[in-house]
Image: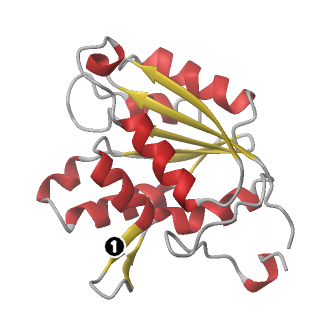
Amino acid sequence: MTTPDPVRIGIVSISDRASSGTYEDKGLPSLKEWLARALKNPIDFEARLIPDEAALISATLIELVNAGCSLVLTTGGTGPAVRDVTPEATLAVAHKEMPGFGEQMRQISLRFVPTAILSRQVAVIRDQSLIINLPGQPKSIAETLEGLKDTEGVQVVPGIFAAVPYCIDLIGGPYLETDDTVCKAFRPKSAIRR
C-alpha cells in the first residue's frame, strides 16, 4: 500500500466579529476537524482568520493558491447581508467557475431550512487550486461536505466533498484519499490508483 500524497489545504474563516476577537471563531476548528477525519493524506493546513473585506479576501485566496494549496475552503460571508462579500471576492480571482458545488450545497441545506436559498456559495478554480465557499455554521459545514445519511448510515444526499478529489486530479493536484466511512470519493474506474 502506498503512502498517501501530502497535501496543503488553505482554510479561511471570514468574519468581522471573529477576526476582531468579539467572539470565538468556530469555522477554522470545524474545517480542520472534518478534513482530518475525511482525508488519509498528511495535511499541511494554511489557516487564516480575516474580516469581511473583499480586497483582503481576494488577496488571501491568491496568497494561498500561490503557496501551493491545492484546495482552499472558506467559511462565512456568503449570505445577502451588506458585509457578505465572500462570493464576489472569490469570483474576482477565478479562472473557471464550478457552479455544481454551490447548487449541491444549497440542495443539502434546503433539507433543513428554507432560508438556504439565501446562500450564495460559489466554487472556482484558480491555477491548480480548487476554492470552495462553505456555509458559516459548523453543523452546516459538515453536512455540505459529507452529505446526508439515513439512520442506517446509507447516503441519502451526496456531499460535495465526494467530487473534490477527482476535481483536484483533473487540475493536476495531489491524489486525495478519503476515509470512506466519512465521505467516499467518487472517481471513474480509470482514475482510481491501484
| Residue assigned mark 1 | 148
Q: Residue at x 74, y 44 (%)?
A: 128
Which quadrant holds residue 192? bottom right
Q: Is residue 1 left or right of residue 183?
A: right
Q: Is residue 10 left or right of residue 149?
A: right
Q: Is residue 18 above or below residue 167?
A: above
Q: Position of residue 88 (x, y in %)?
A: 42, 31
Residue extending furthest toward the left: 114
Image coloring type: secondary structure
Q: Residue at x 30, y 13 (%)?
A: 21
Q: Is residue 146 above or below residue 44?
A: below
Which quadrant holds residue 47? top right
Residue 87 visible? The answer is no
Q: Position of residue 8 (x, y in %)?
A: 70, 40
**Quadrant location of the C terminus?**
bottom right
Q: What amino acid does circle 1 point to?
A: Leu
Crowd around label 1: few <14 · some 14–19 · many ≥20 (10 Å)? some
Q: Is residue 124 above or below residue 98?
A: above
In front of the other: 130 or 150: 150
Q: Position of residue 57 (x, y in %)?
A: 48, 23
In front of the other: 46 or 74: 46
